[in-house]
Image: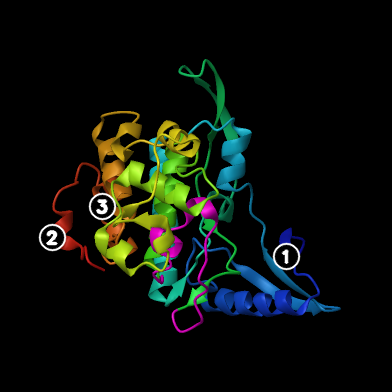
Amino acid sequence: IGGNQIALKIIKNQDKYREAAKLEINVLEKISEKDPNCVQMLNWFNYYGHVCISFELLSLSTFDFLKSNNFLPYPINQIRHMAQQICHAVSFLHDNKLTHTDLKPENILFVNSDYSLIYNAEKVRNGCRLNDTAVRLVDFGSATFDHEHHSVIISTRHYRAPEVILELGWSQPCDVWSIGCILFEYYKGFTLFQTHDNKEHLAMIERVQGPIPQKMIQRSRKQKYFHRGHLDWNECSKAGRYVKSKCKPLREYLLSHGREHHHFFDLLERMLEYEPSKRISLSSALCHPFFQPLHHPGRSQGWRNSCDMSR
């Protein structure tokens, strides 16, 4: 296109993939050029049954950069900027009655992943420090409008909200849970819930955030996971020992007791709230003290009065 490089997504020549591509194009047209933190579709066309979608060319995903950097965590100031952009992009989707449903570090791409080598004293080696943390949200193939059919199971396992696991129904707050998991991964360099089993996943969540609320247990279609109102889980089993070794209460993961780290974990706790109705909305999250240095250096008070915490 005018000599510029582009990214081209080519969809398989099969009916189910073509239908999914049409849904994705519908979403991309809806968000086109309205939100700078979402990837921009340039065009789409049909090539012998293959739907092809052209995009602006982006760089490494936030996961691939983390992996190439030996899973050294991102610095807190870079996490702040990335988190703000992610929250803005997904908040824009929510305002347009959309849920992304597949938020993960692989679906957040850097515009430019050039870096500088910085010595890491803790790891006693050089690490890569990004020069620019501008990101774009990608992959709207699973994005769902409020009025559309909601699949029972959504999200990649490690970023799946408890209401999805418990089959309680889901809406926009499930994206907020995913963002909380993503930001933790940026901060620590590893996945918060490293599992592939539902009950083990719930046990991990309980280790991090405390017991599952009784109301959610009572409403769940997955009663087989529970016994007498509690998760049916044996901490002495092999799986139980694995969960105990892998997970601990959220605040115990703090890397520093500085104010910005405590603000960050306060935001994570609100994003990883069990009850979707009580989970912080992204419009409120963007008013959180963690983000104040990006707007009003030195100001971090009074946010509860100026933001609607219930949305």
In the image, what residue type sits under mark 3? His
Q: Quarter of the image containing the C terminus?
A: bottom left
Name the residue that disc number 1 marks.
Answer: 9
Near-viewer residue (90 or 207): 207
The residue range painted magenta reads: 146-170
Horizontally, is 11 left or right of 140 in the view?
Answer: right
Magenta-span inclusion, residue 157: yes
**Residue at the (78%, 70%) spot, across then down:** 12
The answer to whether residue 81 is seen in the rendering is: no
Q: In which quadrant is the N terminus drawn?
A: bottom right
Residue 84, image x, y percentages: 39, 53
In the image, what residue type sits under mark 2? Asn
Task: Give the residue type at disc 1.
Answer: Lys
Mark 2 vs mark 1: which is more N-terminal? Answer: 1
Image disc number at residue 288? 3
Q: Residue at x 60, y 46 (%)?
A: 112
Q: Nearer the viewer, residue 136 or 98?
A: 98
Residue, disc 2? 305
Q: Give the residue at the far bottom of this rendering.
A: 147
Q: Residues within 10 Å of mark 2 (few under 14, many from 20)?
A: few
> At which x and y percent is residue 267?
29, 49
What secondary structure is marked by label 1? strand
Residue 150, how many percent across, how many down?
49, 76
